[in-house]
Amino acid sequence: MNIFSDGYQPVEVKGRKVQEVIKVGSVHSQEDSLELVFYLKGEKDIRGMAERLARDETTGSWVGKGSPTALFQKAMADIDKIYVYGKGEGVIIMRTPLSNTQKDNLLYQIMMLAVGGPVLEFVYYSSVAFLDFRLPEKVLKKFPGPGFGLKGIRKLLGIRYPRPIMGTIIKPCAGLTPEEVAEKCYQAARGGCQFIKDDEKMLGPEYCPEEKKIKLVSQALRKAYKETGNRCIYAPHLVARADKLLEKARRFIHWGATGLMLNVILGHNMEVLQMLRECPDINVPLYAHSGGRSGISTGPRRIDDTVWVKLVRLAGGDFFQHGVFGVQDVHVCSREKGLLKHLIRVMREEKTGIKDMIPVAAGGLSLEKIPENLREHYQEKFGYGVALLAGSHLLNDPAGPEEASRKIAGLIDSFCQQPKKHR
């Protein structure tokens, strides 16, 4: 028995079987609740810990004279089901009533109701993981979702199904002039790159001012398009205080940016991403950078990657880096094949009114790993629906960025032309 429909097993219960299912039964309906999934482990009875956690994450204990009011009792979250894995250990399904929320600003409220209280701090259990959340249809409709989806990005760039999106990340991370950035982009685009983003360490210092860099890159990519017919999106790093973000995003687009990148884990948050997505004149793909996520999604008190991917997709991210199949020595998230497969499903699963999000394979992606990553991302509906971003492996090629790009493009061509049974 698996908690997730695709068979994904979080690290806490990987390879283990459910010993017992306790069907407690929530008083709250799924249609009127935010459903939360937690792993919990402690020395006490799992049901007792779970029920205490549900209370503490909504109302807390009744304070005052007399008995708790009917409103207090109606506002308290409760437990619907517990999957027991051992003594004092299990995965709990909690329902918290949406009547506790305002109608707007839901991303903030979801996280407040899930882990905004002391759920990650309490000491009456030793380990806890926020594994997933589920929203009723009427709430899903309130979110914008990605602006383009894979189909929209392919149309924007003139990419035929089932081909992937090929790209790179500007390296080195810092220490480049605007002219050097533009030249690297020009060569990569001439070789076939279709998506280029700044490295996250490119912050717009005095030696590489944002306006000059974006304008020069825009000119370089237009030149490459005239010479080759290859379209390429450029997503510069959007560095700004939250109250100045929209103004700067508009300037970036005016200067020639055809995409935008910002960190949504440590630098900003999901609400900022949603604000950009819902702004009518920010009509470019949004790359939600994932830096810092493994510091939050690993350890004995954590928020699973499933949650982050769902939040990014709801908020409007078009691209999100999940990891690289076959690479064990770069990013923590790439070490678990089951996790990568699960996150691809989360990015693509059918949600009314919400487009799919494009998984980004980056972080140690070399030429040798491209076939494996194409295979693992293939699905009939999406084809090879992945953005392959080879940064250092492409830009550090002895033959130069243009030839390295041609090499990767040739490999993709060859792979896509083979009969499926040989891929």
Image (cartoon, helix red, strand yellow):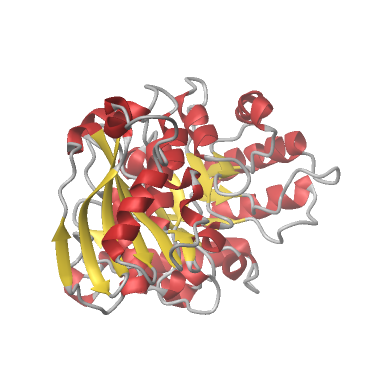
In the displayed structure, 312 sits above or below 255; it is below
Residue 155 visible from this viewpoint: no
Residue at the right extreme, as displayed? 206
Residue 93: give x, y in percent of width and height: 25, 53
Picture residue at 56% right of the left edge, 62% below the top: 295
The number of numbered badges drawn on the structure is 0
Residue 140: give x, y in percent of width and height: 29, 33
Looking at the image, residue 85 sits to the left or right of residue 60; the answer is: left
Residue at the front extreme, as displayed? 66
- Name the one closer to the observer, 225 or 150: 150
Which image quarter is the N terminus in?
A: bottom left
Residue 30: give x, y in percent of width and height: 19, 38
Picture residue at 60% right of the left edge, 29% below the top: 253
- Name the one closer to the observer, 169 or 232: 169
Which image quarter is the C terminus in?
A: bottom left
In which quarter of the view is residue 170 placed?
A: bottom right
Residue 119 visible from this viewpoint: yes
Picture residue at 47% right of the left edge, 66% below the top: 408
In the displayed structure, 82 sits above or below 74; it is below
Looking at the image, residue 91 sits to the left or right of residue 336; the answer is: left
In which quarter of the view is residue 110 placed?
A: top left
Residue 344: give x, y in percent of width and height: 32, 57
Picture residue at 63% right of the left edge, 42% below the top: 236
